[in-house]
Image: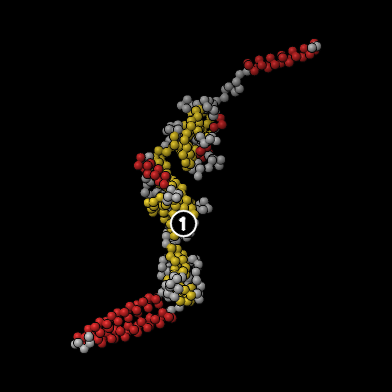
């Protein structure tokens, strides 16, 4: 190695030693900055409705298939298809001619039988006519009267009326069609639309859980003046009228383990249609001591575990594992891991490292923007 190379290496080593000495002697960066500010919420248990979302289907309260009750040819259709009809409204007219003739014949037979009975009545008292002949005349008059009533009923069946009020669908026969009593030819279908049923199902395990929680006193029955059931329509909008729960079935479907429930909704505008699907939000109870934490303050790991960052009484950051329940709006229901008075960091998590000192500030919900995570369905 030449002298020149040796001097160059010596200079490089000197620079390294100088840099190392400066590093060892330099103070920490920004030593006078105050602790970072974080927004916290103070955990306060409160009452929360226990609501379950259950899918179901709209069903009419009544369904009546209008069928032919006499044989004949349809002469007229007297309703607009798809319209609302009332009980007793005329729907079809079947050719009445043969039934009018049958009624006229029955009336004539009745008149003849009554005349014979009246002629025999005074004679039987003087034994001019046997008692048997008189009794036969009375019986014949009674049969003629019954035949007249049957003929009148059959004639009335030629005018087909609506058995219930509701919305009528398409006509199932046309004018000129031959209908039959024996085949009970269907003419139209009427469905009562107001009120209307909402039939849905719930897992039997959830029903048992509800009963256990109520019996244990962890949950309470909801106030009677609060709406118990809200319906969410297929387009995501909330139906304007609340419903009432009518009954819960007493049996469990063995194939699915589900229990059927039925609710009733008013339907004055005809928005709810039979066969329409929806989701019912059923308030089943009230949980009086529920802990809620904004979703933005909860960290969920890929393995499903969840935790929050607490601020200790010494204003230091402390991680805390929690067990989450269902979502409630923009909050999580915390089943375990937190207690009343805990301070949970909801803003500034990126600045809060475990063990470091922070400056807690009250969280203002109005500051929550559109980046808040959605509720879990």
What x and y, as percent, mark residue 65? 44, 66
Question: Residue at position x 47%, y 76% from top?
Answer: 73
What x and y, as percent, mark residue 258? 43, 49
Give the answer, above or below, for where 275 lies relative to 25: below
**Count of labels in the image:** 1
Give the SS element for disc 1.
strand
Say which of 133 and 331 sits in front: 133
For the N terminus, which image quadrant? top right
Question: Residue at position x 39%, y 81% from top?
Answer: 102
Dot 1 crowding, Cα within 10 Å, few <14, some 14–19, many 20+:
many
What x and y, as percent, mark residue 237? 51, 52
Say which of 31 and 13 sits in front: 13
Say which of 167 and 46 sits in front: 167
Identity of the residue furthest to the top in this view: 3
What x and y, as percent, mark residue 88? 41, 70
Question: Residue at position x 74%, y 12% from top?
Answer: 10
Give the answer, above or below, for where 89 lies relative to 194: below
Identity of the residue furthest to the bottom in this view: 128
Question: Residue at position x 37%, y 78% from top?
Answer: 151
Give the answer, above or below, for where 158 lies relative to 165: below
Q: Is residue 107 left or right of residue 11?
A: left
Residue 122 appears in the figure: no
Q: Which residue is mark 1?
A: 58
Quadrant for residue 190, please give it.
Answer: bottom left
Residue 167 appears in the figure: yes
Give the answer, above or below, for where 317 lies relative to 119: above
Q: Is residue 341 left or right of residue 143?
A: right
């Amino acid at each position: 190695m030449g002298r020149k190379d040796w001097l160059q290496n010596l200079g490089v080593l000197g620079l390294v030693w100088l840099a190392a000495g400066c590093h060892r002697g330099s103070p920490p960066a920004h030593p006078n900055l105050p602790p970072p500010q974080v927004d916290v919420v103070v955990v306060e248990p409160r009452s929360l409705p226990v609501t379950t979302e259950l899918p179901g289907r709209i069903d009419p309260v009544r369904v009546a298939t209008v069928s032919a009750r006499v044989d004949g040819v349809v002469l007229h259709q007297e309703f607009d298809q798809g319209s609302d009809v009332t009980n007793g409204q005329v729907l079809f007219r079947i050719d009445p001619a043969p039934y009018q003739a049958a009624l006229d014949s029955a009336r004539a037979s009745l008149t003849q039988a009554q005349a014979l009975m009246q002629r025999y009545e005074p004679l039987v008292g003087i034994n001019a006519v046997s008692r048997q002949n008189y009794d036969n005349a009375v019986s014949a008059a009674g049969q003629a009267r019954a035949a007249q009533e049957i003929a009148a009923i059959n004639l009335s069946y030629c005018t087909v009326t609506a058995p219930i009020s509701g919305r009528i669908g398409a006509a199932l026969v046309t004018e000129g069609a031959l209908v039959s009593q024996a085949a009970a030819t269907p003419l139209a279908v009427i469905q009562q639309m107001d009120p209307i049923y909402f039939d849905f199902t719930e897992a039997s395990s959830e029903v048992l859980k509800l009963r256990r929680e109520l019996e244990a006193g962890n949950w309470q029955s909801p106030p009677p003046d609060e709406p118990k059931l809200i319906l969410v329509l297929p387009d995501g909008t909330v139906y304007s009228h609340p419903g009432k729960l009518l009954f819960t079935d007493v049996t469990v479907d063995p194939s699915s383990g589900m229990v059927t429930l039925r609710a009733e909704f008013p339907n004055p505008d005809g928005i709810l249609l039979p066969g329409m699907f929806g989701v019912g939000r059923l308030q089943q109870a009230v949980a009086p001591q529920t802990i809620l934490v904004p979703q933005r303050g909860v960290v969920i790991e890929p393995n499903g575990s969840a935790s929050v960052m607490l601020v200790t009484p010494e204003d230091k950051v402390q991680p805390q594992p929690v067990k989450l329940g269902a979502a409630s709006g923009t909050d999580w229901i915390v089943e375990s891991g937190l207690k009343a008075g805990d301070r949970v960091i909801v803003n500034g998590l990126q600045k809060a490292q475990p063990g470091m000192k922070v400056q807690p500030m009250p969280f203002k919900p109005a500051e929550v923007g559109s980046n808040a995570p959605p509720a879990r369905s």
